[in-house]
Amino acid sequence: MTPTELTELIANAAADKKAREIVTVDIRDKTTLADYFVICEGDTDRQVRAIVDNIEERCRASGVRPLHVAGLRDASWACLDFDSVIAHVFLPGERIFYDIEGLWNSVSAEDSV
């Protein structure tokens, strides 16, 4: 599965659990950390967990497993690392505070991280 296909699979899995404001950020020219971020939010910690669970289930069904999942303890910000794609699932306040899409959209190719 290509990183682009995985990004689409993750975004669709999040949408299936009513994730809000799903955004993909192409970071291929900005870092070697990953190719894409998928960023979305849930209204409650329970919804964040449900979104994460559905992403994991849908990816596993396609033969892809995350390298690491973090943040489910309090579920205000969960992160799933699929190597080429990193999914971030936030509560709304946490998303605004960290502003990952703003941070990475402002990094130019010359300022590679």
Image (cartoon, grey):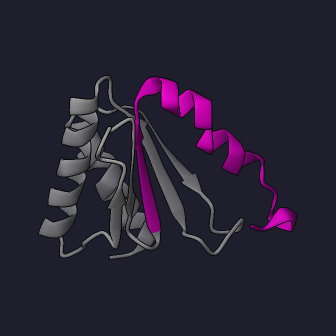
**Res 97 quadrant in image:** top right
Answer whether residue 81 is visible to the viewer in this image.
yes
Q: Residue at x 28, y 36 (%)?
A: 48
Residue 43 vs 4, above or below: the answer is above
Could you say which is closer to the camera, residue 108 or residue 2?
108
Answer whether residue 18 is visible to the viewer in this image.
no
Q: Residue at x 30, y 69 (%)?
A: 66
User: Which segment did they paint magenta?
Assistant: 85-113
Could you say which is closer to the camera, residue 108 or residue 81?
81
**Res 31 quadrant in image:** bottom right
Q: Is residue 100 left or right of residue 93?
A: right
> Residue 103: x percent and y percent?
70, 45
Q: Is residue 17 left or right of residue 106?
A: left
Q: Residue at x 60, y 37 (%)?
A: 98
Q: Is residue 88 left or right of residue 57?
A: right
> Residue 49: x percent and y percent?
23, 41
Residue 53 inside the magenta-drawn segment: no
Number of marks present in the image shown: 0
Residue 40 vs 37, above or below: the answer is above
Residue 44 vs 31, above or below: the answer is above
Classify the position of the N terminus by image quarter: bottom left
The furthest residue to the front: 73
Residue 93 inside the magenta-drawn segment: yes
> Residue 39: x percent and y percent?
46, 44
**Res 20 quadrant in image:** top left
Q: Residue at x 14, y 58 (%)?
A: 57
Could you say which is closer to the camera, residue 44 or residue 27?
44
